[in-house]
Each structure stands twice: as C-alpha cells, then as structure tokens.
Amino acid sequence: MELKRDFEKASVGELVSENYVFASVLHYFGISFYQYPTDSLEKVCKKHKVNPRQLISHLESWAEAKDPTVEELYLNPIELLVAYLKKKHYYFVRQELPFLSNLISGIQPEKEFSSLMADLRIMFPLFVQDFIHHIHEEESRLFKRIELLQDIEDGHFKIHDALTILEKDPVQHLADHHEVHDDEMEGIRKLTHDYFLEESAPLAMKVLYHELENFEKELSIHAKIEDELLFPKAVELEREALRKIRKQIRTN
C-alpha cells in the first residue's frame, strides 16, 4: 500500500476508502473505523494508545501474506494439511468472524439500510453459531480420526484394537455427512443482492459488503480443500492402514 508521508494526518475514512483491509487492521488494534470517519489517524491512535507505524507495518505484512495454492497443499503430507486447516479455523473464529460481527452490530445505518441491517443482525449470529459448531465437530471427529489413523500407521495399537478402530466411523462416512455451510451465507448473499451497492453508498456499508463477500470466497476455498484434498487423503490413509492390518492378521 502506498502511503503519503503525512498519512498520520489523513482521516480514518480516507485511509479506509483507499484500502478496505485497513478497516480490519484497525479492528485488530481495537479501533472501529466507522466511529471515527473524519478524525485523523494520529488523533485516533493517540486516543487508543496505538503507534500509527505499527498499524502500517501490520497492513503491509497482511498484504504480503499469501495462502498456499490447492496444488501446493496437495503436495504436502496430510498432517501439514490438517495443521493448515486448523490455522484457518483459528483465523476465522478469532479474527474474521469477530470483525464481521463488530461491523454488523456497530454500524449505525442510514435509513435506506436500516431494514437490511436489522435482518443481518438476526441472520449473522445464527450463522456464526452454526459455523463454530461445524468447526468443533470437524476438529473433534475428522481431525481426531486422522490422528488415530496415523497412530495406527506408526504401530501404537495392538492389531485387533487397530482393526476395531478402523472399522468404526470410517472416514468415508464422515465425508458423506460433511456439512456444507453455505446455507446461511446464501441467505446473506440474497439479502445483499450478491453484495451489490451503488457507488454512492456509505463507506461503512461498502466495507461490510466487501468483507462478507471475501469471507464467503474464503469459505468456498476452505470447503474445496477439505472435499478435494483432505477427505481423499484421509480415505486413502485409512484404506492403506486397513489393508496392512488385515494382512498382518492373515499372516499371524
């Protein structure tokens, strides 16, 4: 992000309108940008006891951060794939969802957006609740299952115990019941008319729509990684472990 040398004198609204990601950086430091649209960054930072240079440093590091591609993830062993997905879960729950919740609950909408925001304030918390439940289910069942499969591969279980574990709750069963968490986002997408806003819309609404759309894209990529990489790798790991255990039983 290119910044003028006197960026600290620029208003928060001006800086956010130049780069919406700055709104997320401000939130990370406990600052809700929509509360200070006309205040200078210097004034707001002084009030919140934040170093403006720190904000810019964070913005630059976020801009440089790149997620691995699906192709790169495919080449990694399953334990690194699980670690990556856990990290994304943490990011969603600790950063992305709180930021969106803050925007939805905190923005004071103009009259033309008041009805829409009232609906969002009902819909979004339900989505968050459902989404967090999904993450907990996934980590406690699927990720735990993968850990067990690796323990079996490493010989940490007796043969017949391993067979019992392998035949109970197979990964394919979990894959068949893998929930798709786009339902609530579909409702939000319809409510916002595919995140469309007129150019004259308030900055706060533009940032909100931009963040909602980005979050939906991230969820779509996340689901694709799970469905196309994690599950096939886990099914293959389980199949190979089962083949080895049955072979051991036959030869004993």
Image: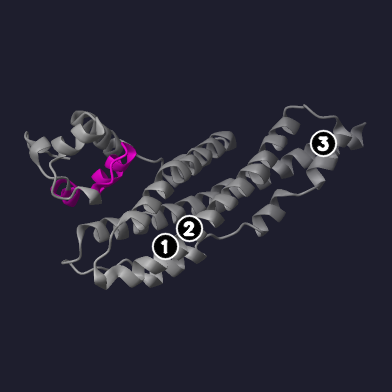
Give the label on residue 163, or none.
none
Q: Circle 2 is placed at which residue position?
A: 125
* Residue 109 appears in the figure: yes
Percent x, y of residue 43:
15, 37
- The N terminus sits in image quarter: top left
Frontmost residue, 42 versus 64:
42
Quarter of image, res 251:
top right
Q: Is the magenta stretch mostly helix, strand or loop?
A: helix
Identified by mark 2, the residue type is Pro
Q: What stretch is highlighted in magenta?
A: 13-33
Label 3: few (<14), some (14–19) or many (≥20) C-alpha neighbours in 10 Å: many
Q: How many labels does the image show?
A: 3
Label 2: few (<14), some (14–19) or many (≥20) C-alpha neighbours in 10 Å: some
Q: Is residue 4 above or below residue 225?
A: above
Percent x, y of residue 242:
78, 41
Left or right: where 86 falls relative to 217:
right
Mark 2 vs mark 3, CA separation in Å: 41 Å
- The C terminus sits in image quarter: top right
Is 19 colored magenta in this rendering? yes
Depth check, mark 3 against mark 1: the one in front is 1
Give the label on residue 162, or none.
3
Q: Kindly state the secondary structure of the residue where label 1 is placed.
A: helix
Q: Kindly state the secondary structure of the residue where label 3 is placed.
A: helix
Which of the two discs, 3 and 1, labels the residue nearer the N terminus? 1
Discs 1, 2 touching: Cβ within 8 Å: yes
Which of the two discs, 2 and 3, labels the residue nearer the N terminus? 2
Give the label on residue 121, or none.
1
Mark 1 vs mark 2, CA separation in Å: 7 Å
